[in-house]
Image: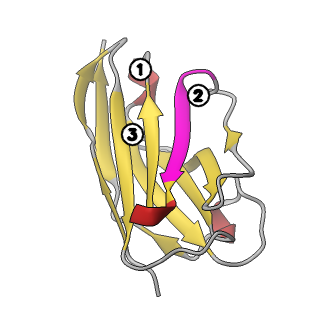
């Protein structure tokens, strides 16, 4: 069992930046897939970015490509999501997810562990 705790959300103006962190409760091996998803009010949870704890297999949703960067610090069992040039449409609760099994990284059902989420609000 892995507990995930997100932090770093908040209120920011359009064009601003935030860095989200996701800390795992125990060691996440290099084969773990780590993902960020987000859910806006009235919408389904959607894929944002994913990475393996080894640092490979990095993927982004088209809507955030070139603005968001996912990274990890395996020594700290932590995954980050650096967000720049934020837009009002980025407003959502951001969730961290993890899985130790094979799967498609942008598929919400391929993850077994989820954090409680952190709110990101971008004012226009």
> x, y (%) of residue 50?
63, 50
Task: Find out whether the residues at labels 3 and 2 contact each other: C-beta distance under 8 Å.
Answer: no
- Quadrant (top left, top right, bottom left, bottom right) of the C terminus: top left
Q: Which mark is residue 92?
A: 3
Camera-nearest residue between 84 and 47:
84
Identify the residue shown where x is 29% and y is 31%: 121
Mark 1–mark 2 distance (CA, rounded to whole Å): 9 Å
**Label 3: element kind:** strand
> x, y (%) of residue 11?
21, 29
> x, y (%) of residue 97?
52, 63
Left or right: residue 13 versus residue 52 is: left
Which mark's residue is nearer the viewer, 1 or 3?
1
Q: Which mark is residue 64?
A: 2
- Which segment did they paint magenta? 66-72
Q: Which mark is residue 19?
A: none
> x, y (%) of residue 9?
27, 41
Mark 1–mark 3 distance (CA, rounded to whole Å): 12 Å
- Please, which colouring scheme is shown? secondary structure
Disc with the residue nearer the chain's start (1 vs 3): 1
Q: Residue at the far bottom: name it.
A: 1
Identify the residue shown where x is 27% and y is 44%: 8
Disc with the residue nearer the chain's start (3 vs 2): 2
Is disc 3 surrounded by few (<14), some (14 to 19) or many (20+) residues within 10 Å?
A: many
Disc with the residue nearer the chain's start (1 vs 2): 2
Mark 3–mark 2 distance (CA, rounded to whole Å): 13 Å
């Amino acid at each position: 069992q892995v507990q995930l705790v997100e932090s770093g959300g908040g209120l920011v103006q359009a064009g601003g930046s935030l860095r989200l962190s996701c800390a795992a409760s125990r060691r996440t091996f290099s084969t773990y897939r780590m993902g960020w998803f987000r859910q806006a009010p009235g919408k389904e949870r959607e894929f944002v970015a994913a990475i393996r704890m080894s640092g490979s297999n990095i993927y982004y949703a088209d809507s955030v490509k070139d603005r968001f960067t996912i990274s990890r610090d395996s020594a700290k069992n932590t995954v980050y999501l650096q967000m720049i040039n934020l837009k009002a449409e980025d407003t959502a609760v951001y969730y961290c997810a993890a899985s130790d099994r094979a799967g498609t990284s942008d598929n919400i059902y391929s993850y077994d562990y989820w954090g409680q989420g952190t709110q990101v609000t971008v004012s226009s």
